[in-house]
Image (cartoon, rainbow, N blue to C red):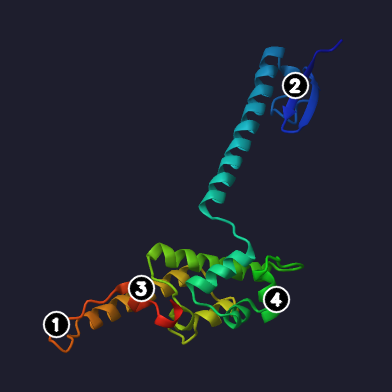
Amino acid sequence: MTNMHIISLGSQYSIIPQGVGVTSLVSQDASSLNNDSLDDMIWRFYFEYLLSSCKKAISNVVETQKEEVLATGDVLTRAKKVLGASISDLSEMLGVSRPTVYSYLSGNEPSGNSELLMKRVFLLQRTIETIRNLGLSIPCSTLLKRRDSRGKTFKELLANDELNDERIQTFCQVELQQRERTKQRISAVPDSSGHRKNFNNEAFSVPAHLK
């Protein structure tokens, strides 16, 4: 009986007779190979396949760990807290109705062709992460109304699909610089006794009615 090679490729198994039908695996003609060299070629192919699969698996794990995937409702809940976004704000930015926003907040996910919507949700999540990474105090409600050099607000850019990672970084950096300048101006103003006031940064950044 002809000796057979059994090759396991993931969940698939191939049975290959020695010296027959291996031209798809090796560049050399099978008839010119002896059993030992053929075994080497087959196992080399199998090893390279496993190595490639492992690299892809590791890459997927790293990407998943780098970016936490949140449910739509979780992103919107965080947007309300971090950006001070109202239901109307979320409705305008996502391009959906207010009842739909409430539905997402209740735990329902978008259905049908929602690729554009999910892109906007993802950009909202990136904005929230950037705000936290920069250490901006929250709620950062002025960001939504801040305008770029063309006079368009953050809300308008997101709603019109003109927002990207670079612009998010720019908006957040400008917000951080403006807040630092404001704090410096206020801290330089003397009180009635002639002494400079010591402001609590958190108390200054968060409106009293939102505490």
As measured in the structure, the alpha-carbon distance from the residue carrying label 1 to the one carrying label 3 is 27 Å
The residue indicated by pointer 2 is 30
The disc placed on residue 195 is: 1
Looking at the rendered image, the disc whose residue lies closer to the viewer, 3 or 2, is 3
Say which label, 4 or 2, has the lower sequence index.
2
Disc 3 to disc 2, C-alpha distance: 67 Å
| Precedes in sequence: disc 4 or disc 3 | 4
Q: Any mark on residue 100, and which?
A: 4
- Secondary element at tag 1: loop
Tell me if I can see residue 44 in this picture.
yes
- The circle on residue 141 is none
Give the labeled residue for mark 3. 176
Report x, y in % for residue 129: 47, 63
**Callout 2 amino acid:** Ala
Q: Nearer the viewer, mark 1 or mark 2?
A: 1
Which tag, 1 or 3, sits closer to the chain's start? Answer: 3
